[in-house]
């Protein structure tokens, strides 16, 4: 850990992640910089999702160190994990919206969890839903929306807490080309506002968009890096 | 806090079926446990009523003088546990016996002399109305100089005391059993709710919700369910009590004993207890679920 990099918001040092006898990540090191746009690619099982999970402590590392915005995840107290997760806005391929809550409530949850005032929550939720074009559907339930619309809500939820980092795991994996482009344009907007964007994908069209660093994983190891 | 209440109420309404099952289960458990408790309360009243009737008869020597009789009375009244000592002369005792045996009065008319001794009838203080204290008092009375015999229905008192003890023990045992059963049922129904909402809980965690933020509405739900179930259980019991009281109360001990329901204070304590069981059941489930 002798390397110093003031611009790195995420640092991973010799990280190993094992599930039983199977290694998902092997001796993996990576710096992700503030306001960087990063694609993590590789075949299924290469370790992309695991890499993202390690960042928000969806899984603990088996070995090595992960630093996120100055927090050492190996030493983080259990009650600090929610604070770590509020640094992230996370977008999943399967949206992970709560079916019993309205669109408004799903997005508001992030701010409620952070202890924001109700008046501020209402204002902010409407603002992010307006941004993704879902304000008029805020009283609807997720089941009544199309996949593209649900992912827009997921993007709004990820953005609601003004996170420093947005993690997206195959965000366009279940979407048609047009919806995928809309989602990516939202992510571009967040990037332009200063957020660090990390996207795990194997979608070649996304990778071809340019302006992003691309790292490729193979069998849990860093295989190649393609600068922005 | 208002936000948590709103979430709890909303969750209850969204999970009406599971909530209804939980509330009904708690209501039935409380109904059964409280019915036992009410039975014990009224049985206890009855036993107290009977206990008040316990007397100790102290028979004096046939040749006891007036001075000895007064001395015995004085000593009896000085004994701990004695509330009152009433003198019953042998003439008065015979008159009472004749009154009690009105249909066989001929047997008593032929007596050449009164065979009954002079006696004292002792009324006891409440603290002495148990087998052990009575035995101890009887020994002290028996040791008095003018006394020939002490009679207080030893065997009956012993059985009576055993019944009281058995009632108390059974009451405590059944209470504990129902407490455990209710707790177990509440914990399991809340665990079902938690399992049905595990995805939601996982999502809440992913967006940065603290354990406290996730748990508080569940605790409130548990407490609301516990309180509501207890109130329903008590209302059902009260309805049953009213029906029983109307039919049976007038005939009990010639109307001397009144059936009674729990006081308002006890009812509030039971509701508070049910609420706490709801909280505790939730705590048990959450402790296992949120590891």
Image: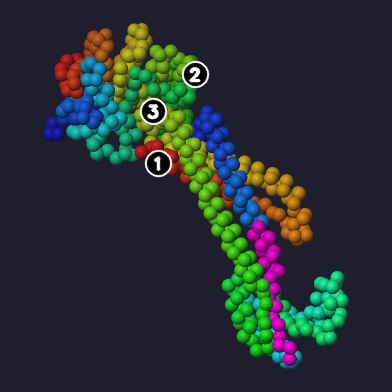
**Label 2 Cα neighbours within 10 Å, binned few <14 / some 14-19 / many ≥20:** some
Crowd class of label 3 (few under 14; some 14 to 19; many from 20; radius 10 Å): some
Q: Which residue is mark 3?
A: B203
Q: Secondary structure at mark 2?
A: loop
User: Tag 2, which chain?
Assistant: A
Residue reaching furthest to the top: A178
Question: What's the residue at 38%, 17% (across, down)?
Answer: A151
Residue A36 picture location, percent across and down: 23, 21
**Number of marks present in the image shown:** 3
Which residues lie in the magenta part? Answer: B43-63
Foreground of the two, B146 or A81: B146
Residue B239 in sight from this viewpoint: yes
A157 magenta-colored: no
- Residue at the image position 54 percent from the left and 37 percent from the top: B22
Which structural element holds mark 1?
A: helix
Label 3 and label 2 in one chain: no
Q: Pointer 1: what residue? A: B287
């Amino acid at each position: 850990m002798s390397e110093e990099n003031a611009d790195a918001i995420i640092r991973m040092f010799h990280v190993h992640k094992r599930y039983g006898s199977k290694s998902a990540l092997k001796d993996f090191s990576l710096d992700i910089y503030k306001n960087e746009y990063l694609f993590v690619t590789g075949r299924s099982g290469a370790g992309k999702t695991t890499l993202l999970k390690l960042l928000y402590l969806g899984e603990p590392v088996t070995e090595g160190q992960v630093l996120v915005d100055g927090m050492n995840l190996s030493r983080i107290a259990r009650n600090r994990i929610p604070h770590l997760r509020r640094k992230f806005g996370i977008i999943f391929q399967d949206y992970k919206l709560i079916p019993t809550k309205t669109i408004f409530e799903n997005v508001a949850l992030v701010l409620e969890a952070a202890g924001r005032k109700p008046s501020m929550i209402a204002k902010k939720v409407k603002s992010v839903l307006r941004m993704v074009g879902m304000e008029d559907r805020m009283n609807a339930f997720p089941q009544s929306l199309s996949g593209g619309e649900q992912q827009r809500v997921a993007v709004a939820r990820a953005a609601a807490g003004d996170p420093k980092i947005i993690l997206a795991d195959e965000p366009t994996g279940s979407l048609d080309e047009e919806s995928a482009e809309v989602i990516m344009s939202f992510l571009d907007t967040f990037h332009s506002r200063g957020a660090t964007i990390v996207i795990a994908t194997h979608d070649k069209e996304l990778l071809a968009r340019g302006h992003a660093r691309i790292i490729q994983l193979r069998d849990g190891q860093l295989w190649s890096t393609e600068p922005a | 806090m208002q936000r948590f209440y709103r979430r709890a109420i909303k969750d209850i309404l969204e999970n009406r079926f599971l909530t209804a099952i939980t509330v009904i289960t708690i209501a039935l458990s409380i109904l059964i446990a409280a019915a036992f408790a009410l039975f014990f309360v009224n049985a206890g009243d009855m036993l107290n009523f009977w206990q008040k009737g316990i007397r100790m008869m102290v028979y004096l020597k046939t040749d006891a003088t007036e001075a000895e009789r007064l001395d015995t009375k004085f000593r009896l009244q000085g004994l701990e546990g004695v509330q009152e000592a009433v003198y019953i002369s042998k003439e008065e005792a015979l008159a009472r016996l004749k009154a009690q045996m009105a249909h066989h009065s001929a047997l008593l008319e032929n007596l050449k002399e009164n065979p009954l001794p002079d006696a004292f009838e002792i009324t006891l203080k409440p603290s002495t109305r148990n087998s052990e204290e009575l035995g101890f008092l009887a020994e002290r009375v028996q040791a008095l100089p003018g006394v020939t015999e002490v009679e207080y229905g030893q065997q009956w008192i012993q059985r009576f005391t055993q019944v009281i003890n058995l009632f108390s023990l059974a009451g405590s045992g059944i209470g504990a059993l129902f407490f455990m059963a209710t707790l177990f049922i509440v914990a399991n129904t809340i665990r079902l709710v938690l399992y049905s909402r595990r995805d939601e809980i996982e999502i809440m965690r992913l967006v940065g919700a603290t354990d406290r933020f996730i748990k508080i509405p569940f605790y409130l739900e548990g407490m609301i369910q516990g309180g509501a179930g207890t109130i329903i259980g008590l209302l059902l019991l009260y309805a049953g009590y009213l029906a029983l009281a109307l039919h049976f109360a007038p005939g009990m001990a010639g109307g001397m004993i009144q059936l009674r329901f729990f006081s308002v204070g006890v009812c509030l304590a039971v509701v508070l207890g049910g609420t706490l069981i709801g909280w505790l059941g939730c705590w048990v489930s959450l402790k296992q679920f949120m590891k």
